[in-house]
Amino acid sequence: MLVLGEVQTAMLMHAEAASPPLAEQVLALVCGERVRTSHRPIGYAASPETYTGVDCPIPLRSGGTLRGVGTLAGRGTLTGGRVLQGSVTARITRSPDGRRRPWSHYLSHPGVVETIGRVDPAGIAEAHLLTEPASSTLEMGAVCRRLLVRVQQSPHLNQKSPFVAHRTTLRWAAETGTGPDDERVRFTVEDDGVRTLRLVIGAAEACDVIAVCEDVALHDWLLTVLLATVERSRIGAGEPAGVVDRLRPAVDHILHLWMPAARLNRDVMGVWERLERRPGLSRQWDNEVRRVRDQIATAAVLLNLRRAGEGGVATLDGSR
Amino acid sequence: MLVFAVSDKGGTGRSITSCNIVYRRALAGHDACYVDFDFGSPTAGSIFQITGAGRGVVEGGLHSYFGAGNAIVEEPRRINVWSESARGSLRRRPPGAGRLTLIPGDRDGAEFPPDPDALDRCVRLFLRLEEEFELCLVDLSAGRSYATQLVLQATATPALRNVVSRWLVFHRWTRQHIPAAAGLAFGRDGIVDVGVRTGHDERRLRDAIRFVRTAVVDPGSSDLAGLRAAQIAWLLDCHQDLLELAARHRVGRSALLGSVPLDPVLQWREQLLSDDDVFARDVANRETIAAFDDLARKLTDPVVWESP
């Protein structure tokens, strides 16, 4: 089975982390359908699935295109009341008789896009990951953006972010059903917040594959935001109090959200295990978190010494 | 924060000053973005010295986003100035600096007529920029334009009502420009008048407007030491007259954000002033950069934005 997807991750535009009831209100994107929520080990809410009909050319690695007809499945999710994701996916299958069928057929297979013509899974997957940042296969990026803007402009939110954070886009392609020796996981970080994830894994349900890709996108975003905050804090160059002030948004809103593979099925845990070996997202995260805490501890010590110095006790650099 | 830059007349130095404010903000570590809503003349690319985008981008700019280009796009193009500027001193992001992004118009784009879809697109664009940038400066064309009306409508919608919006009215320090700037802000079909009609609260909107004086000759400056005593006395008289005129038009000190001195580099070559231009090459004046820094800082200083 070939599944393509795109996940865009952003900061929810609300001054405080959204409470579970608020999360349910802002994610109620389909009238009359329930928002799924869970509270352990981390607050999580997912909107009902939305479907978008498509009849578009799917680019191939060879440079040609293939006609794809069906529906994209999309949803918005909110983790920790703070991290908002728009996620759009398509399961790609070949139309059995090679003909365009009436819409009623496609509507009875939500989230499936049938190709009219022969499917080359690897070729479609590679072309999907290589598309220009401004465009995307089957206009998945546009559907993601629409999902996000619907949530961000919700009247239940106050549209005041605690700090600004760049959005990231994860494009992913997964082929399932391969033997254990052929399993592959490739994660790349491109310019302008674009990341790609290519999975070739064993038997797994589409919903579990989607969940692991959303989880990778979430944690990559957290890491990206933390790295940007640390870089701007001017550690070593600015006044300690100023450095801590610039690090504070990360401490207040980001550090407690790191929880890789919190809700994943066993079939896809192997993906995280491989990512932790290389590139080692948790290793980098832990390192940066230690750096943030060391800065805060150092600033506290310096402040105490300065106060003591004002009382006449010698300070670190020997001045009074 | 959304900041809208307007001027009643052309040639006030609105765009060049705005670009420099955005640049100083980015240097200070903030993510800053310049949005070229001067639809009739989208030339901000030349100030940032972006190769191939001096008069706007070939496709995918703001005109295309608003359906006035060759093909409609879902998102307008973003240009990362730190990596795409042709100017060496701009091409490396200094350590600790924020993102510096230009959202350009389309080449040979023109003003376009009102369109019901444009308002929705404008709201989505501003919300997205507010999410990703600490400062988003929107440069509007001179005079009363459709673009000004569009952004007033957009900022009055519920989705943007809580977002901080501020207005900078640029004017030269002359007898002709002072009443013109006041008229644009408070006169008939001016910002407040149109704003109230689109649903803004009059008091709040008035409090969100400040004036920026450009190309100001300071009669007390040491640069004028070579002038004759009679000339200096005459300059002082003129300056006094203008101060009184400004106060009469409610464009006086309490509504002033700051002044930019007359600088030959800005007059002859509209460009970003880097520290290099002042300290290494010694072509620009230190006071000009200080004025830009001051404006950039005051944009977010709560004391400055208290009710006058």
Image (cartoon, rainbow, N blue to C red):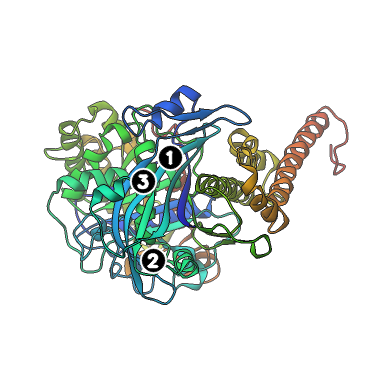
| Extreme-bottom residue of the structure | A62
The image quadrant that residue A181 belongs to is bottom right
User: Quick check: can you spot residue B290?
Assistant: no
Closest to the camera, between mark 2 and mark 3, is 3
**At label 3, which amino acid type do we have?**
Pro
Chain ID at mark 2: B
Closest to the camera, between mark 2 and mark 1, is 1
- Residue under pointer 1: A76
**At label 2, which amino acid type do we have?**
Gln
Quote the CA–CA distance across marks 2 and 1: 43 Å
* Dot label at residue B271: 2
Closest to the camera, between mark 1 and mark 3, is 3
The residue at the point 20 percent across, 49 percent down is: B147
The residue at the point 47 percent across, 50 percent down is: A7
The residue at the point 35 percent across, 36 percent down is: A153
- Residue under pointer 3: A110
Which element carries disc 1, helix, strand or loop?
strand
Q: Classify 10 Å Cα crowding around label 3: few (below 14), some (14-19), many (20 and above).
A: some
Which element carries disc 2, helix, strand or loop?
loop
